[in-house]
Amino acid sequence: MKLIVTVIQPTRLNAVREALAHIGVTRMTACDAMGYARQRGHLETFRGHEYQTQLLRKLELEIAVNDDYVERTIACLEEFARTSTEGHIGDGKIFVLPIDRVIQISDGQGGQGAV
């Protein structure tokens, strides 16, 4: 079992969610996130005044999958999280982490069936 943590643009959430559902991945956790990386922020205007924004809004998705779904989930994220066909700086990252144990709180079921 793996935990796939991905940081994406907020505008790509619906496309990613629908694509994941199409391949059978229907459970995820989404959190608002602020990030600073190669984009280095940008200028914004508020009430006629410009100011520099360092942290940009992103979404963090946490997706727990069984081993046979890892590669297809990653491929789906790579394709549908991009903001264009060639991609841009700031489209996000994908992290794959091992999961040692999973326990479903409602009934105590553990292992792959709990994912």
Image (tube, rainbow, N blue to C red):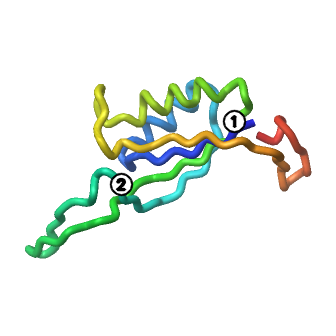
Looking at the image, the residue that sits furthest to the right is: 108
Q: Position of residue 73 (x, y in %)?
A: 58, 30
Residue visible at 21% across and 60% down in the picture: 42
Which tag is nearer the camera, tag 2 or tag 1? Answer: 2
Front residue of 18/60: it is 60
- For the point 41% across and 54% down, the residue is 58
Badge 1, how many Cα within 10 Å: few under 14, some, many 20+?
many
Answer with left or right where residue 49 lies relative to residue 76: left
Q: Relative to residue 32, is residue 102 drawn left or right?
A: right
Per the model, the C-alpha gap separating discs 2 and 1 is: 27 Å
Label 1: state its secondary structure: strand
Q: Position of residue 38 (x, y in %)?
A: 31, 51
Screen quadrant of the N terminus? top right
Q: Which three-letter amino acid code belongs to the residue tagged 2? A: Ala
Residue named by callout 1: 65
The mark found on residue 37 in the picture is 2
Pointer 2 local density, CA inside 10 Å: few below 14, some 14–19, many at least 20: few
- Dot 2 falls on a residue whose secondary structure is loop
Which residue is found at the position 72% from the left and 41% from the top? 98
Residue located 20% across and 68% down the image: 52
